[in-house]
Image (cartoon, grey):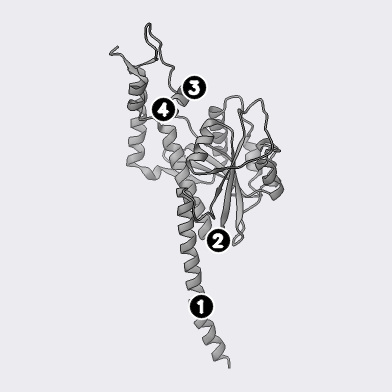
Amino acid sequence: MNNFYTAAEAMKRLRLKKSTFYDLIERGDIPKGIMLPLRRHALYPKATIDKLADEQDKILEEYGREPERLKLMIPTKEDFQQIVEIDQLLYPGETWMTTEELQERLPYNPEVTHVLKDTTTNTVVGYISMSPLKEEILEKLIDLQIDETSLRAEHFTPYTPDKPTDCYVVSIGARPGPGIVQQLYAGKLIQALTNYLLELLEQGDIIRRIYTVATTKQGERLAQGLQFTPITTSQTWQSDYEDFRHPYVLNLEDKESKSRLTQEYQKHLRNRERRMKRYARQAKPSETRKATSRH
């Protein structure tokens, strides 16, 4: 028995929540436990668990020393191929994206896709495709009349300064890795996304709501963890490739929201509004003096 961990011990060694631990087993990232005679619960070889823990600790230590290695950026042509590779790892046999289709969206919104990239190894460790969409297309997605495979390049629209708009998260993914490494990538990706939304805000591109549709248990937990609100729809989606489709929305205008992302966005929005008012007040005396000097 000294060569095995119980499930609880393995979770502690890998610093994983119970749900994440069993998700990784289901995906094959952690080998299934061994059932021994006269035992009700599976056991996990120490050598295997310790190796995974050491691998993840090494990666976490590297990023701890060089946090600036991970940067959110517009993908290069080569990066798009890595996005597709990540999608294939996450959803074997279900990938519908191609590099060509992803790049065809760029003329309509050059910022539709971002990657979280390890600039030292030139490896894409996460990606997100998020953009405003034509209103009728967004409504059909949220009402489950269509899915993302119906999206065409011309359905994407650019951000418009000083015109509050809604966005749709088409897809998001973090590269699988040992233990909690994927969770590290996902956390960094969400933080980078938050910073990007704040950058858009400073440019005058105000986002009202962010919509998405969860199609996996992991995606649903992510939406719920970010305090997205479920949307009730009369439609029921059936597919050979998805267990379900559940639409969600994050209202960035909700001043009572418990979402950290929304709270941070609201704080920066208030600061921006105060600055704009101050600039307007400062400009008025100058304009008055100019008008007086002309008379």
Upstream in sequence: badge 3 or badge 1: 3
Look at the numbered discs 3 and 1 and tell me whether their residues touch, using CB distance below 8 Å. Answer: no
- Between 254 and 278, the one lying in front of the other is 254
Residue 125 percent location from the top left of the image? 47, 36
Upstream in sequence: badge 4 or badge 1: 4
Residue type at numbered disc 1: Ala
| Label 3 neighbour load within 10 Å: few <14, some 14-19, many 20+ | few
Looking at the rendered image, the disc whose residue lies closer to the viewer, 4 or 2, is 4
Write down the residue under mark 3: 26
Residue type at numbered disc 4: Lys
- Between 54 and 206, the one lying in front of the other is 206
Residue farthest top in this picture: 37
Write down the residue under mark 2: 204
Q: Is residue 257 above or below residue 25?
A: below
Residue 18 numbered mark, or none: 4
For mark 1, give the secondary structure.
Answer: helix
Write down the residue under mark 1: 283
Residue type at numbered disc 2: Gly
Distance, label 3 to label 1, CA atoms, is 62 Å
For mark 3, give the secondary structure.
Answer: helix
Residue at horizontal 66 percent and vertical 40 percent from the top: 233
Upstream in sequence: badge 4 or badge 3: 4
